[in-house]
Amino acid sequence: MKIHSDFCLKNYNTFGIDAKAKLFVTVHSVDELVEVLTSFPDKKKFILGGGSNMLLTQNIDALVIHVNLKGIKIIDENDDFVWVESQAGENWHEFVMWTIEHNFGGLENLSLIPGNVGTTPIQNIGAYGVEIKDTFVLCEAIHIETQELLVFDNAKCKFGYRESIFKNEIKEEFIITSVVFKLTKRNHKLTTSYGAIETELQLQNCTKPTLKDVSNAVIAIRKSKLPDPKELGNSGSFFKNPIISKTDFDKIQQKFPEMPHYVVSETEVKVPAGWLIEQAGFKGKRFGDAGIHKNQALVLVNYGSATGKEIWEVAQNIQKSVFDTYGITIEVEVNII
């Protein structure tokens, strides 16, 4: 376990931003993590997982702790369900592929989402009608100040749309070390009606889809819309889909009758942020090396040497334009550092 000074983080964030950490260390076990936390009690800490859900707009004047805990194991099972524990440093997509290879259902719609397992509960990641909270049982997390290991069950996490207690009440207080999911072993409940999954399955002439079929469909859809971070720096969806009151939506729809929407509840409606951004004229636009992806307006990209500040400036311009046009505020999904 080595402490590095002035460490370049370009390869540790999916935007490929060339920022530096004042101090940097990678930990491979809970014991190493505790050792680092106790060795630097007064040093400001910055916790780094897969680097997929953040935009670095500056150097990090702190001890960056790269959580690289590995391991997947079955901790309980019966005829219908299996409880799988994954360590926080496991790559999310590789973990999803592991569950599918074992015919464990529940995560197939979340294939190809960048990042590591440990950060998924923080964001309550979701795609194509499925969210982490649907299969999440619990996670273990270390309190940064006291090094106490606590358990957070589903209810304690206070999951919401791309929200959790880790983003709000106890933000930056804990480091998630492992996550447990409850998955199906048989009678899998496939979610195929959301987005273009059904269409993709039809293109594959798949009438009785398996977990693998659904995963392959999701992967095909994501690859057609989203750039590979290894080839073009990005953090996936940069903005949340705004949820507004039905009353406000009815007023806006009178002026923009073509605006798509999804009913969330009797009083709330979700509007696709990608549609708003595209209609505002930003899809495919480029501002220096910062830009908006040509196939998906939700995705901001780094064409090479853009700084985090430049990408953030583009994001703020998008927010202003959408609000000025529609009166709708679109919030960022990524963490702005």
Image (cartoon, rainbow, N blue to C red):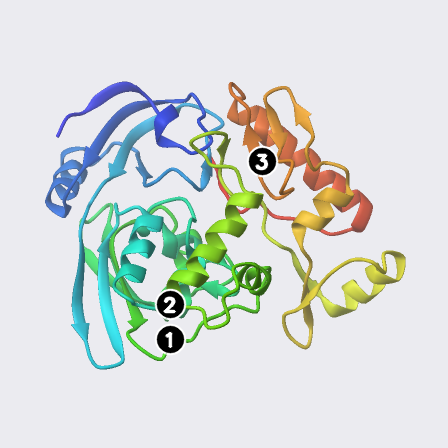
Residue named by callout 1: 188
Three-letter amino acid code of the residue under disc 1: His
- The CA distance from mark 1 to mark 3 is 35 Å
Which SS class for mark 2? loop
Where 40 sits versus 73, above or below? above
How far separated are the C-alphas under marks 3 and 2?
29 Å
User: Which numbered disc flags the more N-terminal residue, 1 or 2?
Assistant: 2
Question: Could you tell me which residue is drawn at 26 percent across and 36 percent down?
Answer: 66
Residue depicted at 35% across the width and 46% down the height: 172
> Which quarter of the figure is the N terminus placed in?
top left
- The reply to whether callout 1 and callout 2 are in contact (CB within 8 Å) is yes
Q: Which residue is mark 3?
A: 300
- Judge depth for marks 1 and 2 and give the one in front: 1
Toward the viewer: 167 or 29? Answer: 29
Front residue of 10/246: it is 10
Residue 319 x %, y %: 69, 41
Residue type at tag 3: Leu
- The 10 Å Cα crowd at callout 1, few under 14, some 14 to 19, many 20 or more, is some
Q: Which residue is mark 2?
A: 106
Instruction: Please provide percent x and percent y for residue 332.
Output: 57, 45
Farthest residue to the right: give it.
255
Q: Which mark is residue 164?
A: none
Q: Position of residue 295 (x, y in %)?
A: 63, 40
Disc 3 packing (10 Å; few <14; some 14–19; many ≥20): many
Kindly identify the amino acid type of the residue bearing the numbered disc 2.
Gly
Of labels 1 and 3, earlier in sequence is 1
Residue at (22% x, 21% y) in the render: 4
Question: Is label 1 in a helix, a strand or a loop?
Answer: loop
